[in-house]
């Protein structure tokens, strides 16, 4: 019928050959022409097995709690492992950075010491250069003293501090007028400033009196 209507090659296959039943049942089923044997065997094949659970509810609840506890333990273990891995990564980064920093400090320590030595040498050279530059200035100061020094004053000691630009001299004057005139000349000079008389004392020298004095002053640059 199908081959005539569809005009396609067809073949009749009995579904009884593919059922997982005994051969006697297949034979009896094939003998029935008016009733489909599939209606009888289908419930047997697709039947759901009936089970009775005799486990108490407390035990079921306990099993559920145990399963949830196991899940919580697994989650805690995973979180702990993650934290340990994260801590290990951070610690390793800190360690490597500290190692790199120590390496850099070790490499530049010698250069730093060399730079400090060069700086010290440079300061010494600057001081020496300053002294050499002031050498001519010292001669100019002495020449200025020679020009303004009265005849009745005797100089005993002259000191220069070219680093701090300080000057001091000690001597004696035959009269106070000569001492005052010398102080006034120093104040008017272009080489001295802030001239101060540190002391002036009178003493006897032979048959006359003299004035011993010490004068301090800043040098003009």
Image (cartoon, rainbow, N blue to C red):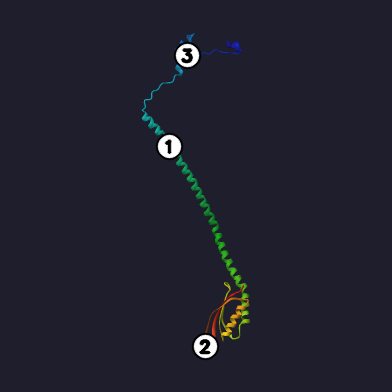
Q: Is residue 108 visible?
A: yes
Q: Which residue is mark 1?
A: 72
Q: Mark 2 and mark 3: span between their CA atoms? A: 159 Å
N-terminal label among 1 and 3: 3
Q: Is residue 160 visible?
A: no
Q: Is residue 96 above or below residue 166?
A: above
Q: Quadrant of residue 43?
A: top left
Q: Are marks 2 and 1 in contact (CB under 8 Å)?
A: no
Q: Residue at x 48, y 44 (%)?
A: 86
| Residue 146 coordinates in the image, percent (x, y) | 62, 81
N-terminal label among 2 and 3: 3
Specify few, some or many for label 1: CA neighbours under 10 Å numbering under 14, 14-19, or 20 or more.
few
Q: Residue at x 54, y 85 (%)?
A: 211
Q: Are marks 1 and 3 in contact (CB under 8 Å)?
A: no
| Residue 182 coordinates in the image, percent (x, y) | 59, 82
Q: Residue at x 60, y 80 (%)?
A: 184
Q: Residue at x 45, y 12 (%)?
A: 25
Q: Secondary structure at mark 1?
A: helix
Quarter of the figure with the N terminus: top right
Q: Is residue 213 above or below residue 96?
A: below
Q: Secondary structure at mark 3?
A: helix
Q: Is residue 131 above or below residue 64?
A: below
Q: Which residue is mark 3?
A: 39
Specify few, some or many for label 3: CA neighbours under 10 Å numbering under 14, 14-19, or 20 or more.
few
Label at residue 150? none
Q: Which residue is mark 2?
A: 204
Q: Nearer the viewer, mark 2 or mark 3?
A: 2
| Residue 39 coordinates in the image, percent (x, y) | 47, 14
């Amino acid at each position: 019928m199908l081959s005539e209507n569809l005009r396609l090659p067809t073949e009749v296959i009995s579904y009884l050959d593919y059922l997982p039943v005994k051969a006697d049942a297949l034979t009896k089923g094939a003998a029935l022409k008016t009733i489909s044997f599939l209606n009888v065997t289908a419930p047997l094949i697709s039947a759901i097995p009936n089970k009775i659970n005799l486990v108490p509810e407390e035990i079921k609840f306990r099993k559920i709690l145990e399963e949830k506890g196991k899940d919580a333990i697994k989650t805690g273990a995973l979180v702990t492992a993650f934290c340990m891995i994260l801590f290990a990564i951070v610690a390793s980064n800190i360690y490597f950075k500290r190692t790199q920093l120590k390496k850099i400090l070790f490499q530049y320590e010698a250069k730093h010491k060399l730079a400090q030595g060069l700086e010290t040498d440079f300061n010494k050279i600057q001081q020496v250069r300053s002294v050499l530059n002031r050498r001519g200035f010292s001669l100019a100061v002495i020449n200025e003293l020679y020009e303004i020094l009265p005849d009745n004053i005797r100089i005993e000691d002259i000191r220069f501090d070219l680093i701090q630009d300080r000057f001091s001299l000690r001597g004696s004057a035959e009269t106070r007028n000569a001492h005052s005139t010398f102080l006034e000349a120093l104040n008017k000079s272009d080489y001295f400033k802030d001239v101060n008389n540190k002391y002036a004392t009178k003493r006897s020298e032979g048959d006359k009196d003299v004035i011993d004095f010490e004068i301090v002053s800043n040098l003009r640059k």
